[in-house]
């Protein structure tokens, strides 16, 4: 405990007691005390702090005796515990202001300006409701003096632009705001010319808990607890500390308000409870940028959620029904291919709402271009596990804009934008805005900050792609060790029903979602975030066939969630009621009857397969349907133990898209080794070696592919 603070508090006690005794000599003990604002509207709860902290009603001069005694007792207990000193000062300063009221000095007027004085009862009701329903994002208490007027203005304007209510104590800061409109209506309320007018703000915070939280008077813990959850707030003390500045800081700490200073700390302030950010050390090219960064840090510290519109403000229509809109070649302005990644950051690393395009904008790209969509998020309840869940939302969020088609995911992201949308003024930065608004709206419990960077320089995208792939690999590795048998339940994914109304994925540790972007762990995280969302846990009751992967309970769920279109899914069979195919699937596997095996076609492979059809043609045939002989799946399913378990697994693969074979070669070798045929990979044909069925059959014979000796697949 700082000796100087205790000395200041004792001095305050002595002065206030002396003033009280003097007042008793000069006035009747029954002299009424009425706290009111500059308009004469009464404040709530008598003297709000004394009533909130002690449960004591002060209506007359003599009623101040008890709080003064309690303030003295608190200063003596434990030789001045910091919290007691803070509470004692809150009481003493409110008593002092009550004496000022009796003397007609409050609410104060200075140079013709009328300060607000205490927050009145009608103001408490109006402001409190706005704070609770989100029309006001939070409460900022400000005092002291910023580095200069420009910085002061910037701080105040930034805070207001983010929807905070500002209560200002003292004349210094107000004096720096000559170009800012203040007053009750503008949400910037100067309370009084002296620093002790912050007492009105502290009183407001306590009255808020009593009024809206029904906290009992005298219950300080109850006040703190209610405000912790319901009143997002902080106290920003600017400039060097005076003695009374130290008192204000102790008072704020006693109420457990987050405190930020832009100077060195007084010794009594515990570092973990006070954020010290020396102004000149803040990042920024000039004082304005530093001021903006200071506001950012205050908002983080106060846990303030800036209120945002529910829909993005963009020059084209925005509706979820537009998600299934396909952009034809004739209508196309630009097609961007690359990656998308959502990654978690510390609060201090990103700025909420910042959207940058690094590289050419739409109209400079030409017909084809690269894209790297990097979405950085921070949140108190955010976890690494939630990253893929948020990433999956990009498909819906971006695809809901008129004239924008979003396909694929991860490193196979494709964004097509129509000429008409560009003519209407759509730019890439609008996509960032869409993501910012959408993630805040849909994930308000876990997302506090969203920053979006859209890279369109081909070289930069290529460079970042390597890092993104490393992250995708790490995510996949986490689920790689899990076995279907080791988990209690599987999960559903209904996300694609906006594109294919009857389709659903059943996701197990060894059978990820067909798009390749949704693992069993992602579903678990998604369900944790939103139990009413697109992923539901599925129990495995009534096992009908463990090899094919069929359960009564899952069949029942499939029936109920495919609008009664399908009643049976065998998860690991290609022939016997296989799962439906999603339009987003990474691969398609189809039977080649002549070869007694299957071929796996990569989504990126546009050339004809040995059966004469392309990936797109097979997909058009199978999408949204249950087609014996064709399954859609993620690339990762290929190397899973469950891959076509009913038909003999990896040994059935006789042909693969060349690119996929190359990309998956390590995993495939391991899967082949597990199957007891470590050299199958060399026996699998591809688009280069065996483009036709005749060439394939000859190749399989020559290589003695094991599928030829397996039981007939059909
Ligand atoms: S493909 Fe399956 S897992 Fe992926 S989003 Fe669609 S339904 Fe979900």
Image: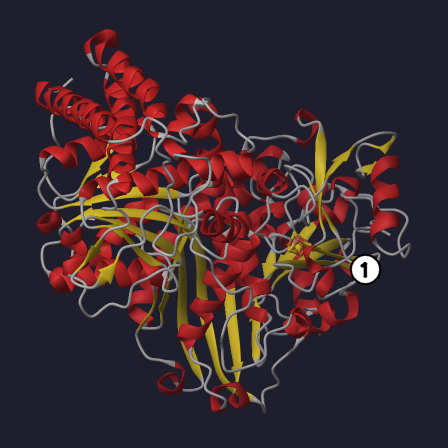
Residue 301 vertical position relative to residue 189 in the rendered view, above or below = above
Residue 151 percent across, percent down from the top left:
15, 60
Is residue 23 at all visible to an observer of this figure? yes
Residue 673 percent across, percent down from the top left:
57, 35
Q: How many marks?
A: 1
Q: Residue at x 83, y 59 (%)?
A: 627
Neighbour class for label 1 at 10 Å: few (<14), some, many (≥20)?
A: many
Question: Left of 608 or right of it: where is 145?
Answer: left
Residue 615 percent across, percent down from the top left:
66, 69
Q: For residue 553, which quarter of the picture?
A: top right
Is residue 381 at all visible to an observer of this figure? no
Question: Left of 382 or right of it: where is 251?
Answer: left
| Scheme by which the image is coloured | secondary structure
Q: For residue 63, which quarter of the picture?
A: top left
Q: Nearer the viewer, residue 672 or 563?
A: 563
Q: Is mark 1 within 8 Å of ligand 1?
A: no
Quadrant the N terminus occupies: top left
Q: Nearer the viewer, residue 431 or 338?
A: 431
Residue 116 vertical position relative to residue 676 in the rendered view, above or below = below
Q: Which residue is mark 1?
A: 502
């Amino acid at each position: 405990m700082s000796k100087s603070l205790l000395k200041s508090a004792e001095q305050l006690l002595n002065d206030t007691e002396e003033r009280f005794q003097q007042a008793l000599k000069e006035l009747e003990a029954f002299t009424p005390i009425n706290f009111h604002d500059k308009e004469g509207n009464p404040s709530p709860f008598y003297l709000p702090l004394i009533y909130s902290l002690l449960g004591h009603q002060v209506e007359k001069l003599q009623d101040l005796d008890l709080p003064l005694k309690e303030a003295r007792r608190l200063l003596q207990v434990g030789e001045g515990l910091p919290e007691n000193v803070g509470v004692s000062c809150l009481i003493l300063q409110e008593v002092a202001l009550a004496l000022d009221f009796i003397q007609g000095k409050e609410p104060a007027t200075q140079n013709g300006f009328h300060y607000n004085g205490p927050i009145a009862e009608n103001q408490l009701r109006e402001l409190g409701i706005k704070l609770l329903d989100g029309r006001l994002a939070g409460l900022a208490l400000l005092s002291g003096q910023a580095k200069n007027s420009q910085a002061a203005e910037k701080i105040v304007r930034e805070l207001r632009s983010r929807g905070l209510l500002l209560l200002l104590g003292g004349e210094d800061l107000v004096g720096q705001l000559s170009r800012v409109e203040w007053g009750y209506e503008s949400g910037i309320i100067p309370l009084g010319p002296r620093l002790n007018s912050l007492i009105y703000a502290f009183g407001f915070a306590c009255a808020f808990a009593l009024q809206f939280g029904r906290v009992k008077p005298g219950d300080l813990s109850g006040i703190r607890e209610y405000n912790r959850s319901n009143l997002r707030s902080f106290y920003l003390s600017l400039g060097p500390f005076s003695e009374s500045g130290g008192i204000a800081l102790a008072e704020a700490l006693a109420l457990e308000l987050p405190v930020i200073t832009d100077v060195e700390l007084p010794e009594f302030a515990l570092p973990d409870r006070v954020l010290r950010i020396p102004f000149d050390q803040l990042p920024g090219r000039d004082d304005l940028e530093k001021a903006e960064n200071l506001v950012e840090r205050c908002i983080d510290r106060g846990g303030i959620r800036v209120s945002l519109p529910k829909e993005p403000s963009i020059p084209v229509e925005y509706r979820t029904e537009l998600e299934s809109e396909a952009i034809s070649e004739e209508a196309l302005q630009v097609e961007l291919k690359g990656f998308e990644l959502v990654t978690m950051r510390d609060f201090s690393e990103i700025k909420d709402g910042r959207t940058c395009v690094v590289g050419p904008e739409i109209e400079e790209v030409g017909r084809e271009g690269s894209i790297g969509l990097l979405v950085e998020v921070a949140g108190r309840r955010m976890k690494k596990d939630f990253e893929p869940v948020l990433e999956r939302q990009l498909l819906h969020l971006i695809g809901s804009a008129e004239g924008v088609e979003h396909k694929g995911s991860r490193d196979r992201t494709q964004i097509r934008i129509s000429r008409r949308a560009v003519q209407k003024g759509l730019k890439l930065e609008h996509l960032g805005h869409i993501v910012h608004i959408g993630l805040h709206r849909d994930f308000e419990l876990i997302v506090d900050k969203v920053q979006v960077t859209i890279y369109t320089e081909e070289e930069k995208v290529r460079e970042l792609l390597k890092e993104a792939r490393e992250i995708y690999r790490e995510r996949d590795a986490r689920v790689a060790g899990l076995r279907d048998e080791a988990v209690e339940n599987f999960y559903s994914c209904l996300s694609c029903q906006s594109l294919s109304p009857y389709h659903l994925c059943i996701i197990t540790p060894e059978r990820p979602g067909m798009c390749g972007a949704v693992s069993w762990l992602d579903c678990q995280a998604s369900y944790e975030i939103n139990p009413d969302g697109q992923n539901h846990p599925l129990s495995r009751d009534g096992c009908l066939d463990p090899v094919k992967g069929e359960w009564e309970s899952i069949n029942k769920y499939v029936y109920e969630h495919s609008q009664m279109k399908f009643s049976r899914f065998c998860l690991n069979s290609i022939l016997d009621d296989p799962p439906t195919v999603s339009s987003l699937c990474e691969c398609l596997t189809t039977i080649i009857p002549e070869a007694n095996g299957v071929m796996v076609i990569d989504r990126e492979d546009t050339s004809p397969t040995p059966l004469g059809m392309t990936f797109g043609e097979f997909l058009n045939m199978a999408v949204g349907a249950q087609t014996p002989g064709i399954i859609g799946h993620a690339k990762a399913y290929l190397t899973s133990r469950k891959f076509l378990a009913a038909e003999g697994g990896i040994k059935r693969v006789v042909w693969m898209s060349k690119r996929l074979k190359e990309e998956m070669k390590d995993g495939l070798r391991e899967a082949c080794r597990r199957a007891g045929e470590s050299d199958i990979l060399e026996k699998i044909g591809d688009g280069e070696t065996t483009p036709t069925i005749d060439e394939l059959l000859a190749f399989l014979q020559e290589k003695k592919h094991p599928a030829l000796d397996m039981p007939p697949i059909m």
